[in-house]
Image (cartoon, grey):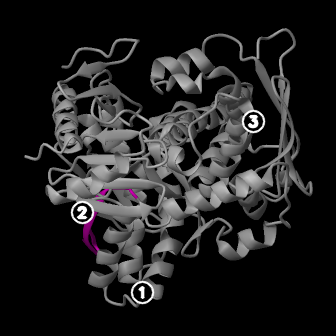
Amino acid sequence: MPEPIPPGGLILEGERAKVELENSCFERLNWRCTLRALPAGSGQAASLVPALVARGYTEVKRVPSLLEAFHPDGHRVAVVPSTGRIQIRVSMKVPEQERAKVALELAEELGQVAEGAGP
Amino acid sequence: MYFGPSPAVYHCHHFNLFLDQTIDDALGFEAGSRLRFLAGREFAGPLLSGIAEANGATTPAEKLDLASKLFAGMGHGRLQVNADAKGGDAKGSFLHYGYSWSQKYGQIVKRKQPADAFGAGFAAAATEVALGLTSETMSAQESGCVAMKAPGCTFTLKPGDRVAKLPPVGEAEVGKQVTPTFNGLYEEVIQPITQGLRDFTAPVAGDERGLVQAFGVFVTLHLAGYYNRISYEAVQQVEKKAPQSVGVLEDLLRESGHVCVFNTFGGILLSPEWEGMVGPLTGEPLPIIEGCMAIARALGFGRWTIAEFEPGKRLVVRAPCSYESVFYRSRYGKAPRPNEYFLQGACLAIAQLAHRVDWKAKPMLTQDFYNALFRGGPLPWKVEQPKSTSCGHSISEVVVTKVEGARA
């Protein structure tokens, strides 16, 4: 059983990124991602998606106002081009107690992509 | 909104579980689950017949395969029916009700009864349609359910469960009740958002589990007749057996509107999809009210319009009709009093969300937050419905006003 979510929410800091728990149907699935190399509102977030596709993600185009890239393991990265908001949606197949760790790992990968560091 | 020949709406797992529980609380589990099964079977039948015909499915195998795909496409999970005229069985995995119940409550509540009466009704109807049997004659009992910690959901199907036919409520009947549409205030904002949401929801289909996970909820495309029959028949049964309790049941049916607006509307408002389409939330009440009208329309609840809005004081919502009122009029005729419970509860909840939620703080829509907003003492709003198309009025109108002395 994972620890209960504190009233103030959950924030995890990594080397390249920060993830903050967001609303989701079940616990710990959706995480707001802030990349140190890509400050919110910089207008560069949209460029992440083609870079993720080059790393094996699949882009799914549903509406032009939201870009989405699907990780081979079922995770999703949603990017709002107009505001730079990035949301990581961890696959429900990941046990709840591991979702925060997986979200931060994905965010670090995004950070790496944003820095142009490559794999 | 129609899905094939059937009136349909989108609702989330929070609403679905709450409404089913309300019916069981009102009638007891045996009668409640029986009613839910009958409603599922009744309204799945015409849907399955219509979709089979439209898709050219003719053999039993083709029709059962189509039924399985349809169920998953609507976000209800994976259901495999293996039956002939003498009966058979069905197996379900990730069924919306049982699976979402186990995910939401499984760690804190031990459930002793199965949760998938709608799935049972759908399996029975699929068998009837596939084999050309008389409609509403096949029984289906769920013997194992993931909500009871079974590894999967299992159903036993048997013939010989005939009930008296009720007046149908399909496209033809509902069409007669739909009244001319009209505009309200702020249409220039509401209509483009509605269209944007429809564009987003149109291609949505079940994932590999047959579930639709979006906006922070599990979404189902569901049969409006199911919701309406279980709600109105529960009220009628309680009126006969325990009339003193009708008010409590009506309050719970209104609360289903709170649950829906808080979880689904709130989830949509907080989503990246919304931010991309509409922009970040400002924290002002009016954009929330406008947005909620658009969400209601996109989910198939009816053309909800803003007739009046005075921040902190009053909200008047009008609609040409609702998915509740067209059902009621089609099946029962004129209602003695306004009874669009979901519409009433939803409008009150919209006022609460617009005034009492700090959207800029990006809140988590938790049960604790819900309890604080809707169960933490007397609500600062009261809701009245002076006009209802259920009663024969030309429009449905809901008035939400601030309670004297309450902080809005």
The disc placed on residue B113 is none
| Front residue of B280 and A7 | B280
Q: Chain of mark 3?
A: B
Q: Chain of mark 1?
A: B
Q: Secondary structure at mark 3?
A: helix
| Front residue of A45 and B378 | A45
**Image coordinates for residue B264, horizontal then vertical, percent:** 53, 41
- Which residue in the protein does label 3 denote? B286
Is the residue under label 2 in contact with that under label 3 (CB below 8 Å)? no
Task: Look at 32% across and 56% down and name the residue there.
Answer: B77
In the picture, the quarter occupied by the C terminus of chain B is top right
**Left or right side of B361 for A59:** left
**Left or right side of A34 for B315:** right
Magenta region, residue range: B75-88
Task: Look at 83% across and 64% down and name the residue there.
Answer: B181
The disc placed on residue B55 is 1
Whether labels 2 and 1 share one chain: yes
Q: Is residue B87 magenta?
A: yes
Mark toward the viewer: 3 or 1? 3
Q: Amino acid at mark 3?
A: Leu
In the picture, the quarter occupied by the N terminus of chain B is bottom right
Q: Badge 1: few (under 14), some or many (20 or more) residues near its Cα, within 10 Å?
A: few
Quarter of the image where one finds residue B303: bottom right
